Image: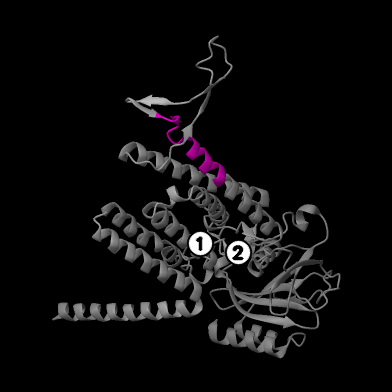
Amino acid sequence: MAKKEKQKLTKEERALRRREDAQRVKKEAREHPVLFTVYVVLRVLVLLVLILQLMNGEYYDVFLCSLTLVLFMIPSFVERRLHIDVPNTLEVIILLFIFSAEILGEIQEYYLIFPFWDTMLHTINGFLMAAIGIAMVDILNRSRRFRVRLSPVFVAVVAFCFSMTIGVLWEFFEYGMDYFFQMDMQKDTWVNVVNTVSLNPQGKNSPVHIPIENVAVNGEIWPGYLDIGLHDTMKDLFVNFIGAVVFSVIGMIYIMGRGTGRFAPRFIPRLKENELPAPEKGNKKEERPSLLEPIALEGPESQGGPELQDLYTRDGKFTGETIERDSGGKGEFFTLGVHAYIYDGNGRFLLQKRSENKKFRPGQWEITMGHALAGETAIECLNREIKEELGVQLPMEDYIKVYRWIETGGHSFADVFFVRADLDESALTLQKEEVTGLQWVTKDEVLEFVGKMDYRTESYRAVVSEYIRNCI
């Protein structure tokens, strides 16, 4: 009986999954009509070709059609299984590339009808692989943001090398198919002149130029010498080189422009931050910093210059501009800051006494606060402030953002975080220029403390107090 109930439950789950899949397909069709249309049209065309070739007994072409249908599923697999967002433009080009290479190129013989067909595809391949190479720097670093911590030139070189490596591997594949399966993927070229030192009559290391009018093979006269794929291979690698260089330069300019621009992002996949699996319980390893998120290559700490802050629009979009801290002149734009409420397993909250040298509330008890430097995200800023002021490194995944306070008078945002940390006070190292003392207070005491923050808005106090009452 239990076995039947289990089978019935499984059927219900399958039916529910089918309904969810159908709803997801409808949603994707509404949100991305061009991509959905291209995908459906190409699949229908491939299926028609498959049926036609099956009726004609062309089973190798049937295999190519089946392979094409499988390859069409790769972008969706990458997005759903690997949580990588493939931009619509890139996905459409990938689908058209697969169709052009397998169906048009191989089955419809476009490689023979149009001499430029293979050249065009290899150029596009070099271009796209460079875009994916730039994304790989970030994805393989397991980052959830998009920032530049490596030199843009270095990232461009990595992207170029990745693209050329893929091109070389493809030529290896073509050679293997030709050698082991007697195919002709590396198309031969007629050669009418040979430059060689082997036929130098004096035996010197100086090439002689020998024209070839004809070659007799098995009694058949050929109009020249067949190079057995050499020219085709080198041409493919050269046009791959051109495509790789073009997008590597585009990507470098995009990174140097601090992530602004609309063209490059259409080709660069990114991790879906909201779909990434949660860190394993008990795993306290710090997430590695992202490599591709736009920041200044040399921060104020390394230069010894003035501290710079990024400028944002009121709705939180980065403008690409920076400003010296406390210099004024923000105009209609805003800067970013952070607030942190640190508490322990006993529900106590940590307050720190600000230095007498501070401009804001000197010598007063406060929470942990800070201003984001140019290129920093709120979490990175908070992580740096806690490490500098308290001498402790907290796992970044433990930070919980609960609110963004918009301080219109000072034209600044303050992202408010809560973080649980069972700290050993004897192990803390205070930054005396910022903090002169620490104290732990109870939940009721911190609620009273927040309630007296008349220098912050009523909405700020209400949100923070409600979170403390209900979540701590």
Provide residue 251's location: percent of width, then percent of height: 64, 56
Report the residue marked by disc 2.
265
Q: Is residue 232 magenta?
A: yes
In the displayed structure image, the side of residue 336 where residue 277 appears, left or right: left
Relative to residue 306, is residue 221 depicted above or below? above
Question: What residue is rendered at 63% in x and 87% in y?
Answer: 463
Report the residue marked by disc 1.
93
Q: Nearer the viewer, mark 1 or mark 2?
A: 1
In the displayed structure image, the side of residue 316 where residue 160 appears, left or right: left
Question: What residue is rendered at 45% in x and 42% in y?
Answer: 171
- Helix, strand or loop at label 1? It is helix
Magenta segment: 222-240
Question: What residue is rendered at 33% in x and 25% in y?
Answer: 219
> Pointer 2: residues within 10 angstroms few (<14), some, or many (20+)?
some
The residue type indicated by label 1 comes to: Ile
Provide residue 301's location: percent of width, then percent of height: 76, 56
Marks 1/2: CA–CA distance: 14 Å
